[in-house]
Each structure stands twice: as C-alpha cells, then as structure tokens.
Amino acid sequence: MAEAEVKLLGTWSSPFVLRIKWALKLKGVEYDFIEEDLQNKSPLLLKYNPVHKKVPVLVHDGKSIAESYVILEYIDETWKENPILPEDPYQRAMARFWSKFGDEKFLPSMWKFFISQGEKREEALVSASENLKILEGELKGKKFFNGETLGFADISLGWIVDTVSLLEEIMELKMIDEQRYPSLSAWMKNFSDFPGIKDSFPPQERMLTKYRTLREAYFATTRGTN
Amino acid sequence: MAPEKAVVLLDERVSPFGQRVRIALAEKGVEHEYQEEDLANKSPLLLKSNPVYKKIPVLIHDGKPICESLIIVQYIDEVWVRGSPLLPSNPYERANARFWADFVDKKIYDSGARMLKYTGQAHEEAKEEFIESLKLLEGELQDETYFGGENFGLVDIAFVPFTTWFYTFEVYGNFSIEKECPKLVAWGKRCMERESVSKSLQDPHVVYELLAYLLKKKYGKV
C-alpha cells in the first residue's frame, strides 16, 4: 500500500512551523516540506488555508489542517507512536493550558519587550519576567513540562530555546540565567539535546539578521512618536 | 458505581466563556456546585485555582483546577464519556472542530469586541472583519443542524453564548445579522431548543443592558 502523502507548508524561520517538524520527526513521519513566501502567498497556501492564509498548514491525503496546536493534536491522533499528549484527561488539560499560555501570554510579552523602547521597555521587561517566573514555577522538579519525556507543552514552548537566545544576543542582555531560572535553564538544555531536536533549529546567523532587521524597522516607525 | 468526585464551577453568570462550560456540564448531566464570583472582589479559591490568569471559568474536579473555557469543555468530554460526544471520533473532523472553535475566539469575539469598543475608522474596520468572520462561520455550517452535523458539539458550544450578543452587535454596528447570516440565526434558535443552552444563556436584552453599561463605564461609549 502506498504511503499516504504528507505535506507541510511553512517557512524556514517560523517557530510555529518548527514545532510541527518536531512532532513529525518524533513520530517518524515522512513529509514534503514546501517553503512559502509570505510576502507573495502561493495559490497552494491560499487553497489549503483560505481562512487565515498562514503557515503552518499540514496536508494529509489531500486534506488540510491549520493552526499549529490543532495540527499537533491531529498528528498525535493519527500517528500513534511516541505519544505527545498524555492519556490522563487532567494532564492533557494541563498540556493544552501551558501551550496556550506560551502562545497567548508569554510570546507576546517577549515580543513586546524586544520591540519596545524607553519606559515601555521597562514595563515590558517586568511583564516578560513575570511570565518566565510562572514557567519556572510550573517546571520545578521536572525534566520536561510533560514529565520524564518531551511532550505537547514542550514542543509548543520549544521556540523559547533558540528564540530567547537570539533576542538576548541582539539586546545584549541575559534573560534566562541559571541563577534565577535553574529549572528553565536545565529544560532548555534537555530539550535541545533530545533526539531529533538537536540540529533542527534554523540557521542562527540568518535568524539574527532577520530579527535585527525587524527590530530596526519597529524602532524606525516609532521614532519621534514618544 | 463509585460516587462522583466533587465538581465545582467558579463562574460569573453573564460570562459567555462560563456559559460554554455550563452548557457542556448540562449536556453531560454532571452534578456540580456553582460558585458565582464577584470579579471586583475575587475569592481566595479563584486566586488559588487560577493564579496565572485569575479569571473565570475554572472547573475544579476532585480538587484539581482546569482553566480556559475550551480546554475545560474538552476535559469534560474526555472525563464524562456518557451521552453524545462533544467532539467527533475521526481525527480530521476533530481537527476541524478545534479549528473553528479557535476561530470563534480569535476572529469573531475579537472583532466583535473591537466593534463594540471603538468608534470611527477602527469601528468600521472591526465591523467589516466581524461580518466577514460571521459569514465564514456560516459557510462552515451550511445547511447542517449543528456545526457537529447531527451532533451538538464543541463549535456549537463555543459560539452559542455569543448569539445572545447579536442584539447588542446589531445596535452598535447598525446592521442586521439575520440579513447577513440567516443560517446562523436559525442555528441559534435551534440551539435554544436544547435545555442545556436555554438554561445557561441570558436574555439578549439583559445582555444589551449590561454591555451598554460596561461600554459606557470603561470606554465612554454610548
């Protein structure tokens, strides 16, 4: 029987796309990766994600699934090896909660800090640090958010591992230091050492250039508006 | 059969997010204790159960709290397997249900709220986005009984509380939802025939009075 066709539409730099790559790798699923140009969206992307017109989009047997956490759950339910979500309903709810927290609270607060200047920057730092403390508190004593092995919440929060280091380098300050965030620091190392994750991060030099450029663009638009 | 472990719902009667949970609990026939929260004076139990967001709804099952309305609804579906499942069994259809439930929050609620809060250009843009989003959702419903097909499910539960906001949206937006999306309005009426829904939701005019009061108080909007 022919292997069912799996395609992933994405970009080289998107952390949301990367989490799908991790999940597929963990499950040993072969797929075609289609690099999208978001400034010039392809007919394929518009066909497979007409509602949001965003990446990632997973196409399996001609049917498309969009929104990264929806895709992750679909992958987990379709390919049963190496489960990402636990079996216990309460643990599942916790995994979903921390994934949502990462995307809806922590990520925006980090981004705001990254693009802010002056007084707003100070406020943004307080907010981002509070969220880091919350994550540290949740992780305490555990190797992964999922427990002994990597799971749904880890995959969802994995963008922290390379992106925060990136932002730290550009801003020339250390946000996740071992003293204040011992569990989070250990988690970052455990996560990046995990088989399949290690060499999967996008090329750092290219990412540095991209984020530096983005930051400059934000500063340029807000210059003279304070 | 072992006695059911204690279920407590921390909620606020008027919250559409809380209403989602109440509907799900009613659909599954789950006995629970209801605790009305005064959000201006949050209880120690709420602060302890949801330290991250300090928001309702929170479902506490056997002492363990679960937060975020759609996460709670899925939890209810996974724990109380009696009655009709709230999510389909096929993975692709489940993904589709999760996608549209997320759409209700990310697009419909977001643009609807902006339309209510803002005036001028921002209001007009939000209104356009809101109507477009409603139409997309209606496109998903087509001529089905519910978003879950024959089964009342996650997407129905996610969106139905906002049908009681339609009157408010129409007044502030100066348009008719029935004209733009007649199938959605018909679907809303069908849902109201379910006891779980009619008992959990508020009268649209009561919702209007409350929202009008809040909009004036918070944003000076009349």
Image (tube, coloured by chain):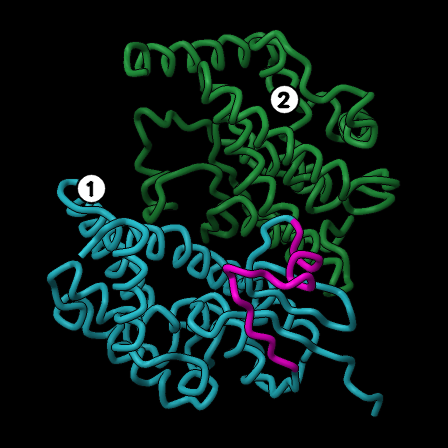
Quadrant location of the C terminus of chain A in the rendered image: top left
Q: Are marks 2 and 1 on the same chain?
A: no
Label 1: element kind: helix
Quadrant location of the N terminus of chain A in the rendered image: bottom right
Cα distance in 3D space between marks 2 and 1: 33 Å
Left or right: where A74 falls relative to A176? left
Where residue B60 sits in the image (x, y, percent)?
Answer: 70, 69
Query: Dividing the picture into quarters, in which one does residue B83 lie?
Result: bottom right
Note whether residue B139 is visible: no
* Amino acid at pointer 2: Val
Where residue B35 sits in the image (x, y, percent)?
Answer: 60, 75
Closest to the observer: A88 or A72?
Answer: A88
Where residue B102 sits in the image (x, y, percent)?
Answer: 45, 56
Residue under pointer 1: B122
* Amino acid at pointer 1: Ala
Chain letter for the residue marked with disc 2 in the picture: A
Residue under pointer 2: A164
Q: Is residue B171 above or below residue A39?
A: below
Chain letter for the residue marked with disc 1 in the picture: B
Label 2: element kind: helix
> Is A138 contained in the magenta span?
no
**Residue at 25% across / 69% down in the picture?**
B166
Q: Is residue A116 above or below residue B30?
A: above
Q: Is residue A224 above or below residue A121?
A: above
Chain B's colour is cyan
**Residue at 55% across / 68% down in the picture?**
B37
| Magenta stretch in the rendered image | B33-51
**Residue at 55% across / 49% down in the picture?**
A71
Chain A's colour is green
Question: Looking at the image, do the residues carrying marks 2 and 1 touch, with CB atoms under 8 Å apart?
Answer: no
Left or right: where A58 falls relative to B78? left
